[in-house]
Amino acid sequence: MSWRSRSVRVAVACLLQLVLVGVAVAPSLSARVTGEEYRLAVAPVDPVDPFRGAYVTLSYPDLTQARGDGSSLSGIVFVPLEPVAGSDLWRGRPAQSQRPARGPYLRCNADSWRLRCGIESLFASQDTASRLERELLDGAVATIRVDRRGNAAVLGVQPDR
């Protein structure tokens, strides 16, 4: 085997890994670059995981996987967003299995007990995560970006004042 064929194989393997990383971060990157900003009510759940590092796990009380009839969906679901009257906040309407024809929505994965929309974790230093948990206990607001395909990313979290 010549050094050229070995170099080509190594280059192809490296390029393939680079493409896979791009595919993995594309939804979040798309939301950050092309998305519109929305503010959602949020509550912290857990500040530190010893295996994943310091981060704040976020819960969104106004997002639910329950449909209008009270039953729940599983798999890929779409949660339409609507403005909260008299506020600059948004909330989720009942999840649906079909992509909404108009208006902002989140594309989520629903399992038996929760929605995963890509906005459940905010990574921070351990000190920042602990401080955020204390500050956010009385209510907080998360600023997110959502692109036209429903991909979302958390930009930041602030106490609700």
Image (cartoon, helix red, strand yellow):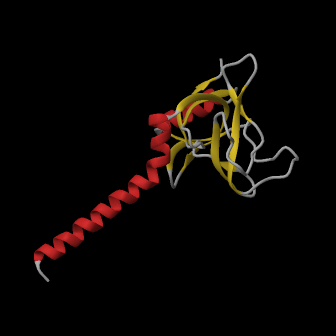
Query: Eyeballing the image, is 1 above or below 149?
Result: below
Q: Residue at x 78, y 42 (%)?
A: 94
- For the image shown, how many numbered marks are present on the structure? 0
Position of 26 with respect to 42 (left or right) is: left
Quarter of the picture containing the C terminus is top right
Q: Residue at x 51, y 55 (%)?
A: 51
Q: Is residue 45 visible?
A: no
Of residues 145 and 123, the one nearer the viewer is 145
Quarter of the picture containing the N terminus is bottom left
> Which residue is situated farthest in the bottom direction here?
1
Residue 151 on image: x %, y %: 56, 43
Q: Which residue is drawn at 64% across and 34% down?
A: 104
Res. 73 image quadrant: bottom right
Res. 86 image quadrant: top right
Of residues 33 and 63, the one nearer the viewer is 33
Position of 76 with respect to 144 (left or right) is: right
Q: Can residue 127 be seen in this view?
A: yes
Position of 60 with respect to 152 (left or right) is: right
Query: Eyeballing the image, is 116 above or below 136?
Result: below
Position of 16 with respect to 104 (left or right) is: left
Residue 71 on image: x %, y %: 85, 52
Q: Which residue is drawn at 64% across and 48% down?
A: 108
Query: Eyeballing the image, is 152 above or below 137?
Result: below
> Which residue is situated farthest in the front direction here?
101
> Which residue is situated farthest in the right direction here?
69
Res. 137 image quadrant: top right
Residue 110 on image: x %, y %: 69, 53
